[in-house]
Image (cartoon, coloured by chain):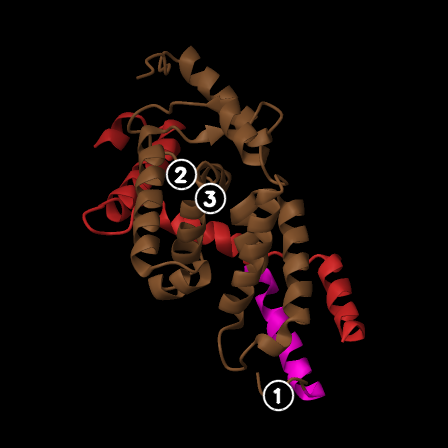
Amino acid sequence: MKFDKDKDGKDCSENTKLSSQQAGAKTGHRAGQKPEWANGLRQLYDSVVEEPLPDSFKDLLAQLDDKS
Amino acid sequence: MSDSERTAAQKADFKRELTEVIPHLRAFARGLCGRPDMADDLVQEAMLKAWAAQERFEPGTSMRAWTFVILRNAYLTDMRRNRFRGEYDENVAERILTAPAGQEEPIHLSDMHRALLTLPPERREALLLVGAGGFSYDEAASICGCAVGTIKSRVGRARAALTAMMEDGTIPRRSTDDKSAHKAILQELDMVAAGNGISAKP
């Protein structure tokens, strides 16, 4: 309906906006549930977990055996 | 307490398990102290302490929980020495934007992190353990050495504070030298230019 009106370039942005709103509506109910951002917290943690290990850690691990 | 010396095999097991939890230690430390370089220093400090204390680790129990206690203690010691003071406070104080009401903006991880860093340390820690690290309230309580009820209350308050920040749009942003903040400012200016300005601050 709305899309029929402006079928030019704006179509695309309208679409993404709508779909993100729908997604928000799905996850956004907060009655007793975890808040919307809860997943972000997990992602924040996981994003660090998934980082490749810096060499300094490999060096440290290699040194541990000498320390015992 | 009984077997004071560990066999080579036990040491190898310990080292393997310690290696496996490093990414988790880094994630926890990053959440606690905010700065990646300092967080990694903290993790390395904790790893050395864990290695030195490996006789006290009971094989079969959670290496992640055990090392988190060590990491946490290292963090608290550093906090008391003022090593991390001011790091996050500065970032927080610099700039607080009010986002337009009802805006459907995705929450960026950097926003999330800065919001997290505004929380008092004990609430941040509780939320990190339960909400990010996936520990149970019981596990989190034993890591922090406090009552389960205390952890529940801290997590509850932390969640309420973050929810309020997300809903009010009062997530602190970094200074203008930060790329994402810069982009956000430009977007804001675009919006103001388009007549959708965020003039009204509550």
Q: Which marked residue is nearer to the observer: mark 3 or mark 2? A: 3
Of residue B88 and residue B176, the one placed in the foreground of this image is B88
Of residue B114 and residue B104, the one placed in the foreground of this image is B114
**Which mark is on residue B106?**
2
Q: Answer with left or right where residue B79 lies relative to residue A35.
A: right
Residue B33 locus on image (x, y percent) = 56, 45
The Cα–Cα distance between marks 2 and 1, rounded to whole angstroms, is 53 Å
Residue A57 locus on image (x, y percent) = 71, 61
The residue lying at 61 percent from left, 39 percent from top is B82
| Identity, as a three-letter code, of the amino acid under mark 3 | Pro
**Which mark is on residue B125?**
none
Disc 3 residue crowd, few under 14, some 14–19, many 20+, Cα 10 Å? some
Q: Which residue is mark 3?
A: B121
| Identity, as a three-letter code, of the amino acid under mark 1 | Asp
Is B185 drawn above or below residue B164 in the view shown? above
Residue B113 locus on image (x, y percent) = 49, 41
Is B178 drawn above or below residue B134 in the view shown? above
Q: Which residue is mark 1?
A: B3
Magenta stretch? B7-24
Disc 2 residue crowd, few under 14, some 14–19, many 20+, Cα 10 Å? few
Chain under callout 1? B
Q: In the picture, residue B148 is in which quadrant?
A: bottom left
CB contact under 8 Å: marks 2 and 1: no
The colour chain B appears in is brown
